[in-house]
Structures are given as C-alpha cells and as structure tokens.
Amino acid sequence: MTNFDTSLFTAKQLDEQDILAPFKRQFHFPKHQDTDVIYFCGNSLGLQPKNVEAAVLQELSDWKNLAISGFAKAQNPWLTYQEYLKPTLANIVGAKADEVTVMNTLTVNLHLLMLSFYKPTKQRFKIMMEAGAFPSDQYAIETLVKHFDLEPNDAIIEIEPREGEKLLRTEDILSAIAQHGDSLAVVMFGGINYYTGQLFDMAAITDAAHKVGAIAGFDLAHVVGNVPIQLHDWDVDFACWCNYKYLNGGPGAIGGLYVHEKYASNPSTPRLAGWWGNEEAIRFKMEKGFVPKTTASGWNISTAQILNTVSLKASLELFADATIERLREKSIQLTNYLEFLLHQLPNIQFEIITPKNVAERGAQLSLYFLENGKAIHQKMIDNGIIVDYREPGVIRVAPAPMYCSFEDVYRFYAILRDHF
Ligand SMILES: Cc1ncc(COP(=O)(O)O)c(C=O)c1O
Ligand SMILES: Nc1ccccc1C(=O)C[C@H](N)C(=O)O
C-alpha cells in the first residue's frame, strides 16, 4: 500500500512509476479553457481513442469503393466482423472466445437473454435483482414479467440494504436466494451498481443461485474494462454489457454478451433468432430452418453493424496492449489515492458511499451530498471537472485507469481544496 500525501510531487512520482501512463496520449480529451478537462466520467461514456478515426475511415472507404463486396473483401471482411472482437473481449470478462459476441445494445440484449433463460412455471417464476438497479434494467424486467402475464410485485424480488445502510451485504443476498429457493427462476444482478459503485460477489451469487436450481445472469455495464472477472470459471450462465463506458466503444456502441458454453454449444438452447446467428456456410442458402452457430454468436440476429462496431474494435486494441490485469492494478491505486485526497477536504461535506474494501469496488467512488449536490456538481463542471450527478444526491467520480493520471486526481483535489 502506497503512502500517499497531499503534494503534487507525489502525484508526479506516481505517474512516473506508472507503466500504463503513456496510454493517456492515445485519447482525445475535451478542453476547458484550452486545457484538457479532468475526465472522471468514463463510467458513463469513455473517451475517444485516437486510433478510432482511421479505423472508421477505413470502413467508410471500403463501403465507398467496394459496396456489397465489402462483406467478403473489405480489409476486415464484414461477414465475420463480430469475430474480430471476441478474443480480447473474452479475455476482459474471463470467458472463452466462443462464449462472447457483440450485437445490438445493452437493454435489448438483456431482453433477449432473459427470453432465453427465464422460463417461468407455476412453481418457479421469481426474478431477483438488487434494489436500485439501473432504471433500464428495472423496466426490462418489469415488462418481461408482464409479458408472461405475471405481476411485477409477485415475480420480482428486490434485495434492499438493511435499515440505515446504503450497501448490500453479501450474506443478505445469499440468504435471500436460499430463502426463495425453488420459487426462484433467475438471479439478475448488476455486477457493479451504477449508483453506489458496489461490486457484487458474482461467484458467490452464482453458486447460491445454482444451489436452489436458479439461473445466474449479470448486467456488467459498470464492470467490463473496469474489474477483471471470470465468468466461465464462476459458471455464470449469462451476462450482457454495454461497450461505451470503460471500453470506450463510443456513444451507443454495439453491446456485448456472454453465454456459458454449456448453453452456447447446444443448438436447442431457446433464443429469438435471425440469420446472422446461422452458420456462415449455410446463411446464404436461404433455406427454411434455423441452424444456430454453436457459440455465443448463435444469438446474433441481424447483419453485423460495422459502423457501430469499428470504434470498439479499435479501442480493444488498446485493451489488448494494456491488459485488464494491469489496468486493475493501476485502478486500485488510482482510486485509493482519490479516496485518500477526498478525505483531506474538510471544507466540503459528503459521504463516500462506495465500499472502502477494494475487492468490493471498481474505479468509481460515489460521493453522497445531503444538500447542494447538484450545485456542487455544476461548480465542478464550471471548473473543468467532468463527473456526473445521479439523483438523489450522488456525484460519481470515476478515474478510468486507461487515460486518467495521478496528477488528474491531484488536480481534482486541488480544485476542490481551493475553490469550494
Ligand atoms: C446497468 C445499466 N443498464 C442499462 C444501461 C442502459 O443501456 P442501453 O441504453 O445501452 O441499453 C446502462 C447505461 O446506460 C447501465 O449502466
Ligand atoms: N448511455 C447514456 C446516455 C446518456 C447519458 C448517460 C448514459 C449512461 O450510460 C449512463 C450510465 N449507464 C449510468 O450509469 O448512469
């Protein structure tokens, strides 16, 4: 554990020791009064990697010059476009390459995967989530159970923190799973809660779900590219995520999903299908009868979305170089440093609601303001600090290790110290 202090010298020293520091120069930063903003909002939208522009221009050029032939003859043939992303993405989520694919967008993929894995019966029909899950996930699950003519109040179990607490205790999640037992169909948690920044024990939750015969699925929006995970080894059944946060795939970038190979390799696993999930060899035979690929790509439905995927493809090259393990190592130190400096600010009243234990959090710290949160957020923005505000009362501060430096964290602290 590094001994931190409040000097700029220490920040600069930490940057000098950081082997990932050069990656910062690979990104475009918005400007505030001619200097780079302090960008701690990679948990909402990651910055643009500088290699994206050329990669997009390559696809535009192939479209311009090859048109339909680009599916076979583009520099990166479009027919198999999702395949190019799989090795790096699989590494980031601890899966086999054939257990992941990219398609659609997060909430759409959550719907599609729930339709594969949620088979309510009279006895087993409940879905368990964390209370306060991201609204889009809540809406997805609410409308899914209604689709099956079930009452959300009966079918959705939300696990809440104990009275007076803001975080969930793993023991409470596990005992709730055991308690609902054979009425539980799916446990569907966020891997990290967007509001509190709490990282859940996905291995333990998966085990507990399996013990009662339920499926375990996760929304990894706030996990991918942030914290290394082992989906395959933990025996997680399914997961989905967006690629526009820590993975820097760009606004509305193509989403990602994981299906454990025991289901992915089985053509009988239920799904809603389209021709892009068919084997390439037979895709253009135009025959009746869906024959899925025996990989997660068997969930792909529509034509590869080249312009929506190319930026992620480019960004993943940086992740392959940096590696998620090294990013996490830096991230722990960077967020610990942020936490240390935040505790040196007696002039501002807030509570860090994110767990103190590094094993229970990623890059993000959530600062809860009893009052004036919104005004303080605006003042941060006015001072060139990009963070976001989430009702009620939370400013989320997330230094992404790929492009944030220790000096950025110091500058953030210095602004809060001097101007608030
Ligand atoms: C946990 C979570 N779920 C769902 C979404 C929404 O995803 P999308 O709009 O890409 O469907 C987000 C972020 O926007 C999120 O963080
Ligand atoms: N997709 C967006 C579009 C516009 C503004 C924010 C988002 C986010 O991704 C927010 C993020 N999911 C969150 O954790 O709040």
Image (tube, rainbow, N blue to C red):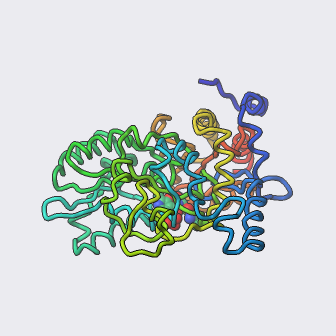
The quarter holding residue 15 reads top right
Left or right, residue 88 beside residue 149: right
| Residue at 72 percent of width and 40 percent of height | 405
Q: How far across and how far down the image is residue 141, in percent?
A: 34, 66
Q: How far across and how far down the image is residue 321, in percent?
A: 68, 40
| Residue at 50 percent of width and 63 percent of height | 281
Left or right, residue 281 beside residue 125: right
Quick one: which residue is furthest to the right in this view?
34
The quarter holding residue 402 reads top right
The quarter holding residue 305 reads bottom right
Q: How far across and how far down the image is residue 67, in percent?
A: 71, 74
Q: Quadrant of ligand 2?
A: bottom right
* Front one among 209 and 331: 209
| Residue at 53 percent of width and 59 percent of height | 102
Left or right, residue 112 beside residue 328: left
| Residue at 47 percent of width and 35 percent of height | 359
* Front one among 43 and 20: 20
Residue 223 vertical placement versus 275 (above, below) = above
Q: Is residue 284 visible?
A: yes
* Front one among 129 and 2: 129
Q: How far across and how far down the image is residue 277, in percent?
A: 45, 64
Quick one: which residue is furthest to the left in this view?
123
